[in-house]
Amino acid sequence: MQPVNKTCRGQRTSCKDAPAISIHKHSPLVWLVALLSLLLLTCGFPEKVGLDDERVIPLLGAMDITVRDSLGFPDISDTASVYLEGAGNGYDAMLHVDEGLISRTVAFRLIDSKFEWAGEQLMYWGPEDYETVDGKMKEHITMTYEAGPESISGYPIGRLHMDYTGNDPRLASKSVLGPEDIEPVIREWAHQR
C-alpha cells in the first residue's frame, strides 16, 4: 500500500503506520454496520408510547386488578412519559414511567394470553443531594414489590420492600422502613417542589 500524504496526529506526514482504509458502498462492512444499526434501533430499547397506545391499554388494565393500591403504589399520572419495553429476563413486557418526582418500572407476564402485573419498582426523588464515591446523587425512596412466581429484581416475592438512600436522619437511621416512615417524607418532598 502506498503511503498517503495527509495529516496524522496533527503533523503533515506520510502516515506509514496509519494505512488508509477504503470502504466501498457495497462492501460487506458497510452492510454489516447498517444491519447492526437497524437492529440496535428496533430491538431491546424501550419505545416512547402514550397511555392510550393499544399495546399499553391491556397493561394498565392488568395494573387495575392487583393489590397495588393496598401496597401504596399511586396511579400513573396522565402527564407521565411512558416507555414500553418487550420481553426480558422474567417478564413479557415492561413499562418505564417518568413522572418528575416519581419514576418507576412495572413488569408484566403473559399468562393464558392475558397480561398480569408481575411487580413494580417505584422511586420518589427527594430535593436534597448526597455525596457518593461517584459524585452527587439525589436522595430517594424506593418501593419494590414482586408478585412472583419468580423474582425479577432479586427482592423477596409477595413482600413490599422500602428503602431510602440519602442523608435524612429520619430515614437513614432505620434498617427497615414502613409506610408510616415514608409517607410523611413523601408529602414533605411534594410540597417543597
Image (spheres, rainbow, N blue to C red):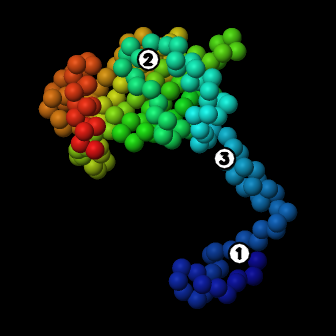
Q: Which residue is mark 1?
A: 20
Count of marks placed on residues:
3
Real-space CA distance between mark 2 and mark 3, rounded to the nearest whole angstrom = 34 Å
Looking at this view, is 25 or 193 the one in front? 193
Residue at x-position 22% and y-position 34%:
188
Residue at x-position 54% and y-position 86%:
11
Give how far across and how far down residue 178 sits, in percent. Answer: 26, 18
Residue at x-position 69% and y-position 52%:
37
Q: Answer with mark 3 or mark 1, whichever residue precedes in sequence.
A: 1
**Quarter of the image where one finds residue 5:** bottom right
Left or right, residue 170 beside residue 160? left
Check the image and report above or below for 109 versus 38.
Answer: above
Give how far across and how far down residue 16 sits, in percent. Answer: 65, 80
Label annotation for residue 68 = 2
Image quadrant holding the C terminus, namely top left
Q: Amino acid at mark 1?
A: Ala
Looking at this view, is 130 or 66 the one in front? 66
Give how far across and how far down residue 60 sits, in percent. Answer: 56, 24
Give how far across and how far down residue 128 sits, in percent. Answer: 23, 44
Residue at x-position 77% and y-position 60%:
30
Q: Amino acid at mark 2?
A: Arg
Could one spot residue 31 in this view of the protein?
A: yes
Disc 3 crowd, CA 10 A, few/some/many (<14, 14-19, 20+): few
Image quadrant holding the N terminus, namely bottom right
Left or right, residue 122 beside residue 182? right
Q: Residue furthest right?
A: 26
* Viewer-side label of 3, 1: 3
Label annotation for residue 40 = 3
Left or right, residue 54 beside residue 132? right
Mark 2 residue element: helix
